[in-house]
Image: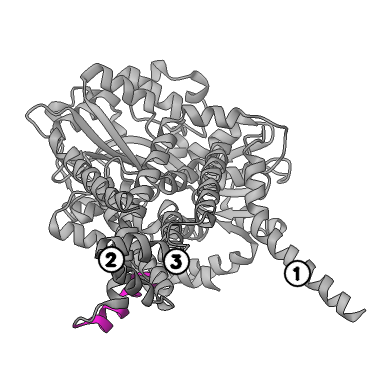
Amino acid sequence: MSGDWVRRALAAATAAAYVFLYAPIAILILFSFNAARQTAHWEGFTLEWYRRLLSNELLLHSVANSLIVAGVTTAMATVFGTLAALALARGRFAGRAATQAALYLPVIIPEIVMGSALLTLFGAVGLRLSLATVILAHVAFSISYVAIVVRARLTGFNRSLEEAALDLGAGPVGVFTRVTLPLILPGVVAGALLVFTISIDDYIVTSFVAGVGATTLPLQIYSMLKVGVTPEVNAVSTLLLAVTVACIIIAQRLQRAPGPGRGV
Amino acid sequence: MTRTAWKFPAAAGVSLAALCCGGGAQSGAEERQVNIFVWSAYMPVELLDAFRRQTGIDYRFDLYDSNEALLEKLQSGVADYDMVVPSDYMVQILIAQRLIQPLDRSRISNLGNLEERFLDQPFDPGNRYSLPYLYGTTGIGYNREKVPEPVDSWDVLFDPRFGGRILMLDDMREAFAVALRLDGQSGNDRDPAALRRATERLKAQKPLVKAYNSGDFANILESGDVDLAQGYSGQLAEVVRKNPARFAYVVPREGGTFWMDSVCIPAGARHPAAAHALIDFFYGAEAGAKLVNTVHYASPNRTARAGIDPSILSDTAIYPTDETLGRCHLIEDLGALTTTLDESWTEIKAQ
């Protein structure tokens, strides 16, 4: 009887936690279909905000900027982060311990310090602010996330698998692509997804280093607050959410599918 | 798998290179582009499109949400903007830091269209660096159904009857200006004793204040979350125009803030000629009228008046009367005293 009571309490607590996590998102989606311009009251269903969104050049431009930045950042940070993790896990070089410690710095350092430092750096070297400086800044703080996640994946890595592949005649490149990479792929994909989400909603660092024509979606939404959030913002957030969720579902499907290395 | 892994950095490298060089290709003898950095909802895209059709000069524009954000960008020295629109006191700071350049009046043929009384302000005597773009006041927007008697004093924001129904701008200088005026002082008063009294007044007000907010105040008032909101004229006027039976805007009898945003050209701008052309364009009669009809802020452009919607011109929330303007003052940069004020403000908000 008492065990039953505990189980119910836990179920209720879990349900409450999920409501707490997802209620704001559900409300945001709901209100993107709200006919009222003021976001506080429900006045009926409409697709008006989605229609307006498609004719709002500024908002669409900022969405495009965000997708470019997040896409390029994810690609670059994933490659460099994975290489860094491999080097740290396997390399024996001077300053390895210091490099490893420094890896955590961009994760711990307050964003506002990072943004300010990057802006000073760009100013010092005379690099004109643009979308490229936003990408550089995002890559700078993203590499660490990928490296840390992939590094964790490498901790339990059984190197005899690689040795076996070498014994059976595979070259170094073949070992990497057919044994090492498939085994650490879940870590690489997780790191990439993490970086994509961090990059696409970053406000603080971006606000420091964004240049001409480089207004990203978070910057655009924040400056729109000056005149009030319209349901268009809810609509664009809903669409972005749908894209992100789709990406994650696809990534999970890919991970579940047996890779070439799974048979080893 | 290898192929994808290699394709990524290559593609990224190419696009980065393209992005880096994209901006540089524009600088020639003919300036075909102008980069604008401006407050949101302050420069209609349709007008910029008209400018592009008329002159062949393309535009790119980005938005900022505070004067300080603008200052930060210009201080970096690599911002690449050709035209910015800082508020009064920020113009003074930008001049002092040599971040904006003197304007070439010979390139602005429509200069004569501006009303004299908005020129030659204390933040930029003689308008060497800046010209007025739009102006307005800071006052009180309120819900007439919830506030029984007409509001005419800042006192109402300190009235316990409306506790929890009051919104103040999240703006140190605007808050102090209110407290100082209620004390019979100017909003720019530097007397330590007066500032101390103002601090105490604002501390006592804190429990009555539901929110300190400089961005969304008009919507919060409109949605009914507060009944009284300190705020800028343009956005509050918008709320009042939608529902004049329910809302009203007033500049209290003690006086309010008169603010003015000005067009400036950053030092080292790469397209100064294009920026001058754009400024001149905005001071034309037709563009000036279109601007006001779209953004609902008052313009110092005299010739634009003919084309402005009469209901806007007669709306005193948008175009303050001379009597109201006479009661209002610009916020002046207080120099070193700002730090002291900043500490008091932190103290008020943290208690």
Q: Amino acid at mark 1?
A: Ala
Q: Amino acid at mark 2?
A: Gly
Q: Is A103 in the magenta?
A: yes
Q: Are labels 3 and 1 assigned to the same chain?
A: yes
Q: Residue at horizontal 56%, vertical 31%?
A: A50
Image location (x, y in percent) of residue B272: 15, 35
- Disc ID at residue A217: none
Secondary structure at badge 1 equals: helix
Q: CA distance from mark 3 to mark 2?
A: 15 Å
Image location (x, y in percent) of residue A138: 33, 57
Image position of B55 (left or right of A141): left
Secondary structure at badge 2 equals: loop
Give the image quarter of residue A59.
top left
Disc 3 versus disc 2: nearer the observer: 2
Q: Main secondary structure of the magenta part?
A: helix
Residue receiving disc 2: A169
Q: CA distance from mark 3 to mark 1?
A: 42 Å
Q: Would you call the spot at circle 1 few (<14 residues within 10 Å), some (14-19), or many (20 or more)?
A: few
Image location (x, y in percent) of residue A148: 39, 71
Q: Amino acid at mark 3?
A: Val
Residue receiving disc 1: A13
Q: Residue at horizontal 48%, vertical 47%?
A: B255
Q: Would you call the spot at circle 2 few (<14 residues within 10 Å), some (14-19), or many (20 or more)?
A: few
Residue receiving disc 3: A264
Residue nearest the observer in this picture, A249 or B153 = A249
Secondary structure at badge 3 equals: loop
State which tag comes first along the sequence, 1 or 2.
1
Q: What stretch of residues is rendered in magenta?
A: A94-107
Quadrant placement of the N terminus of chain A:
bottom right
